[in-house]
Image: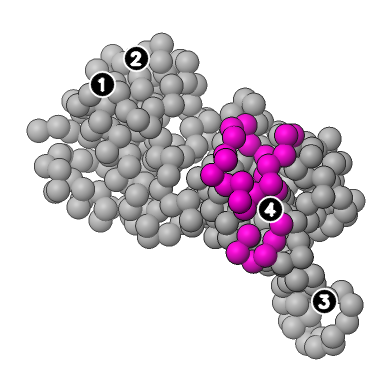
Amino acid sequence: MVRIKMFDVAPYEIDAIKNWSAEHQVEVDYESNPLTMDNIEQVKGYDGLSLSHNGPFNPEIYSKLESYGIKQIAQRSAGFDMYDLEEAKAHNLIITTVPSYSPSSIAEYAVTGALYFVRQLPLIKQRMENHNFVWDAPLISRPVKDLTVAIIGVGRIGSISAQLFSNFGCKVVGYDIEDKPELENIVEFKDSLEEAIAQADIVSLHVPGNKETYHMFNQAAFNQLKDGVIFVNCARGMVVETQALLDALNSGKVAGAVIDTYENEAQYFRRDFSNKEVQDETLLELIERNDVLASPHIAFFTHEAVKNLAEGGLNSTMEVLETGDAQTRVN
């Protein structure tokens, strides 16, 4: 019987894993801890490996896995910036991801976050808590249908976001490295990032995290925005230079920011710090600001996504074991 070892398994994944194991007659063992050099010997004797790794990945692990006869790492996420793809390939390891586990969930979150600021909900909540029930100019918002939305990265998630904003009556412009003629009826594509964001009221990011997109939104990019933009990042934390975002918030370039991913999130996100000290001052500022809606990389988090991620990692593992390759391979 084929044996698969899973790391980083959360309690909410276990039912999906057990159901998949029974259906496919494959032995699946799992644990909650991440794979490290301290516990890597647990992989011995297994045929396949599935992780949900978050943060830096020790490069010494690649050679160890190769020595154990492991041929792949099935990452249970769409992102794969934690891995050195060339180093993995040098050790005959195929890295796979789950590129489409619930794109609608992430798109819905992005739109919801944008509307949170469009309709002045932070100020309304603050006013209500202070028992200030006055109607006045700061509470007035623009109709969503009158806004221009820039979708940066019009792939699986970006295209659904574009459709949702279009359904509200927004003008939707987009920027992507690939042509998407099938979306031209709802998205007006621009030739550059600068052109796409120049007149946008909302900017929503849906690009992968890689060398090309690292700090795509830096000081220069934020300076291209008109004043008062609502900025949404449900993509990868590395895409945004956080200090540049804070400067844009302070200057008024950005009126509100939806930050579901953060470039230094690995130490904190998915962990409970209720009774611990958070030492990242930048993260604390993001959390405490009224003009930022911060969340712990949770835009995807629906029942559908949890099931698809667990099954997607296991399916990719089996595909590599049975064929020597996988459609979701990234290296």
Q: Calculate the distance from the C-alpha at mark 2 to the C-alpha at mark 3.
A: 58 Å
Under circle 3, the secondary element is helix
Residue 191 lies in the magenta-colored region: yes
Q: Is residue 110 left or right of residue 316?
A: right
Give the mark, 4 or 3, whose residue is nearer the N terminus: 3
User: Which stretch is magenta?
Assistant: 166-192
Residue drawn at the location 68% of the way across and 42% of the way down? 189
Q: Is residue 136 above or below residue 178?
A: below
Nearer to me, 323 or 268: 323
Real-space CA distance between mark 1 and mark 2, rounded to the nearest whole angstrom: 11 Å
Q: Nearer the viewer, residue 35 or 256?
A: 256
**Is residue 268 at least partly visible in the picture?**
no
Disc 4 to disc 3, how far (Cα)? 25 Å
* Amino acid bearing label 1: Gly
- Is the C-beta separation of discs 2 and 3 under 8 Å? no
Closest to the camera, between mark 4 and mark 1, is: 4
Query: Which residue is denoted by mark 1 in the rendering?
Result: 324
Q: Amino acid at mark 2?
A: Asn
